Amino acid sequence: MTALNVQLLMTGNEVMAGDTIDSNSAYIARELAAMGIKVSRRVTVNDDLEQLLIELNSMSASADIVIMNGGLGPTVDDLTSEALAAFSNSALQIHPDAKAQLEGWCERRGQALNDANKKQMLIPAGADIIPNATGSAPGIDLQHQGTRVFATPGVPSEMRQMLPIITDRISARFDLTHRTIVRRLQTFGLGESNAQQLINNSTFDWPETVELGFRASAPQMEVKLTIHDDSHQEDQERCIQHIHTLFGDHIVGEGDTTLAEAVLKLLRERQQTITTAESCTGGLIASALTQIPGASAAFHAGFVTYDNAIKASVLGVSESHLNNCGAVSEPVVRQMADGALARASADYVIAVSGVAGPDGGSGEKPVGTVWVAYGSREELNTLRLLWPLPRQLFQTMVTACTLDLIRRQLLGLPKYCRYVDQRQVVPTDQE
């Protein structure tokens, strides 16, 4: 791996106060890691000129590259340009490319260039800009006493479209002899300990050339297989095939594949559609599907029927079932599913009704109970699962598992997978 010393300087009062979560530094670190570059240090400071200067001077003593994030906007607390000018002992001046970019940005929006925006034209003398294809603030590319400083806006989408430009400039400037290749597998229904134990129990001779890593988050777990030399791709591929053998149908896809994306891909290939009827998840299943570009090809309608009266009037759920069995019951979710299939004229459906908590549970139906109906008119399955989790995590996991159940049905996979075996509650005759 290259010996480049790269450090990150994140700035923003909102980040320091906890009002904004810093996802930018994690994204930058992952993209650099794909080039074989590890971030050696990360510092976050307030929008304070003195603090910025202290950190810039400190970092420049050891860093080959500093990537700054934030502080390039039009307001008085955006101080990155000033800090870089003071750091490099240079004056701020209007950069012609920055001026042209801002004028074009305003023209596309049909608005005049105001004095606040003009601040973003000011770049330290001798510095170059990093074009911003979506926002108003150009990035800054500054070389000073052996340290290359790249400054990007704090808006994640703007930073992300600038980062390839930065990595190209780094590659052009420095001799990166080896290329890191990261293959990522997305899984659902396996925890880190179970995944690691499956690998430990196998007889596969894991090559030293392939680094294995896990990144657990709700709802999916990512498995990373990393090599630091192109010549080790055969070893990497052997390890990927071994993971497929061990984890089997818990693997959703590669890269950034989500459960919703996997489901929509299968439906589009079959030219089929899906609908949702949600109570306890409040529309999260439909939201997960519609976040995917092109979702309209397979998702035409969803129903959020939170109140019992709406379940009856919109989806045709029997009032006797609601009164006698309760909203969280098999008869109700079956009728929710039937009603949604009929009204949306869809091929597949997911229907859920549960007790999200923190209150509302009972001895028979504790918090975390959810009835799920999923499938097609010809094959409609029902399950009662128990996810005793905080409310939002409960909704997240119910959303994920229902999408996974549909994925399994579309692929003809066994429905009684690990998490169903762990979470399923078989109703007694008394319920």
Image (tube, rainbow, N blue to C red):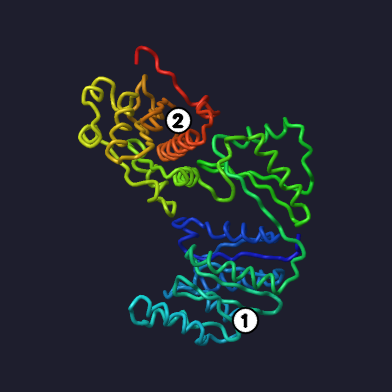
Q: Whole-percent x and y of residue 149?
A: 62, 73
Q: What kind of residue is marked 2? A: Trp
Q: Which residue is mark 1?
A: 88
Measured as percent of width and height from the top left, residue 83 is found at 55, 76
Residue at 31% across / 31% down in the picture? 338
Residues marked 1 and 2 touching at CB (< 8 Å): no
Q: CA distance from mark 1 to mark 2?
A: 56 Å
Question: Would you place residue 375 above or below residue 229 in this image?
Answer: above
Callout count: 2
Point out the residue furthest to the top here: 429
Which of pointers 1 and 2 lies earlier in the amino acid sequence?
Answer: 1
Please, what is the three-letter code of the amino acid marked with disc 1? Ser
Mark 2 highlights which residue? 387
**For residue 157, which numbered disc appears in the image?**
none
Q: Position of residue 297 (x, y in %)?
A: 39, 50
Please give the name of the residue rendered at 60% of the width and 72% of the height, measured from the top-left corner: 150
Q: Measuring 75% from the left and 63% from the top, which residue is drawn there?
A: 2
In this rendering, position of residue 369 left or right of residue 80:
left
On the image, the x and y values in percent for residue 92 come to 53, 85
